[in-house]
Amino acid sequence: FCETKCQLDLCFTLYFHLLSLKVIHLRLCFCFTQRVPVVLLLHELSDYEGNWSILPALPHLSAAYGHSASWFFFIEEETRVILAAVLQVLHRYERQEEWFLGKRLHDNDASIIHHYAFSEDPTSFGYPDPAAGWALSALLLRRLAERIQHEHLKSDFTIDWKHEIALYIWEEGNGPKLTAVPEFCTEPRDNCATTFTTYLPDCGDPVSKEDIFVAVKTCQRFHTERVPVVKATWEKDAGYLEYYSDVSDASIPTVSLGVANTDRGHCGKTFAILKQFLSKTAPEADWLLIVDDDTLISLPRLRRLLRCYDPREAVSLGEKYGYSLVRNGYSYTTGGGGMVLSRVAVSRLVSGGCSCYSDDAPDDMVLGRCLTSLRVPITHSPLFHQARPEDYSETLISLREAISFHKHWNIDPVAVYKHWLQDTHPREEL
C-alpha cells in the first residue's frame, strides 16, 4: 500500500479477533515509507486468559502501543479487510479526539443478556458488530486504560462484551457513543472496507453422530413439559443421548444419577454426568455435550464445528462468559447454550480433583474455575446462545448460523427450532 504514497500521516494498530477470542495485532505506519506489519496475538501481551473480553487488555495495549499508534482496530478472525479503505475511513476522523467507530447494532426489545438496559427505547443505544470491525482512537483507549485501573466495574460478570464495552465507553453520557461507519460491513456491497465470511468454517466432513455423547439435564417436573420438545426437534440427530434426571422414568427413558434435583446450579448433577461419561457403561465418544432440557440445538452444525478441533486435546467449547475478569477472575462456557468438552478435558476435570462446593452451585462457573486452574483453554463460539433469538440484535450474523438457543419463555420452541436451527438441506449424514 505504501507504494501508492497516500498522504496519510497515520499510524494505527489493527486487531483480528480470533474464533477463540484471541487477537492478532497488526500495526502499520503510513508516512511515505514502507514497513513490514508487526503481528501480535493479544494473549502474548500477558499470561492472563481474560484478555479476550478486551477491557482487561486495555492497560497492556496502552502501555505497549498507546503512544506509537493513532488507532486500534478490532476485527474477527474471518473478517476480510481492504486495508487502504480502512485507512481512508479512519483519516476522516480527527485522531486527536476521542472516537468509537463501528457498524451499529441495537436491541429491538429490552434484552435479558443486556440486563434490560434502555428498556424504554432499546434502539437508542448502539454497540459494535465485531464481525464488521470496530475502532478506538488512541486518545480514547489511553483514557479508558487509565480509568479501568482505578475504578471497579458495576458488574463482575462479562455476558456480552461488545455491549458492555459500549456502555463502559459511553459512561452514562460522559463519554462518546458509537459512531456508525457505513464502510464497516458484514455483507458485501459497494464501498465496503470490511466484510465477513462465516463463524462456521469448513474444516472438512462433519464428525460422526457417534463421536458426540449428549447429556440432557432434566428433572421430573419437566418430563412432560420440556422433554417432549427435545424429542420433537433435535433428539433424532443424536447418535448417543441420555436424559439425566432425579428419577428414573422408563417412558422417556431417563437415568437417575442419585443426585437430588436443585432449583438452581445443578453442579452435583453435572459432575455426576462427567463421571458417567468416563465410565465403562457409557459409549467411547470423543465429545461430551451437556445441555439443559430447554436448550434448542443444531447437532449437524455442531458436528461441522467440531471437525475444526482435535479431540485428543483438552477442549472446552461454548458461549464464553466471564467472572471478575478485570480483577484476575476466570472464564466459563455458559450452561444453557450447551457445554462441549473433549474426553481429554473431562478426564482432566475428574482426575484433577475438581468438585462442587454444593450440589446447587452454578455448574458452568465451577467448571470454568476448575478448567482455568487446570490451564485448559476455554474456547468461545458466538454460534452458541444462552438466550432466545429475540434477545439478540436481529442483524447479528451469528444468528444465521446458530448452533443453539436457550429458554422457552414466551416462545413456541418448536417453531424457533424450525426457523433458526433446522437445516433445509442438511449435509449427508455420516
Image: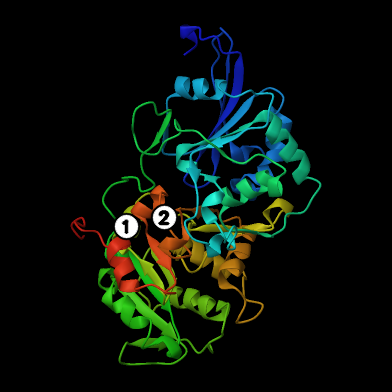
167 and 204: which one is in front? 167
- The structure residue drawn at horizontal position 54% and vertical position 65%, both measured from the top left corner, is 112
The percent position of residue 384, horizontal first and vertical second, equals 43, 59
* Relative horizontal placement of residue 411, taking residue 104 as reference (left or right): left
41 and 373: which one is in front? 41
Q: Nearer the viewer, mark 2 or mark 1?
A: 2
Quadrant where the image shows the C terminus? bottom left
* Local SS, label 2: loop
Q: Amino acid at mark 1?
A: Arg
- The structure residue drawn at horizontal position 45% and vertical position 33%, both measured from the top left corner, is 182
Specify the label residue 301 is tagged with: 1
Which of marks 1 and 2 precedes in the sequence? Answer: 1
Residue 87: in sight, yes or no?
yes
Per the model, the C-alpha gap separating discs 2 and 1 is 9 Å
Residue that badge 2 annotates: 383
Contact? badges 2 and 1 (CB < 8 Å): yes
Q: Amino acid at mark 2?
A: Leu
371 and 401: which one is in front? 401
* Relative horizontal placement of residue 19, taking residue 200 as reference (left or right): right
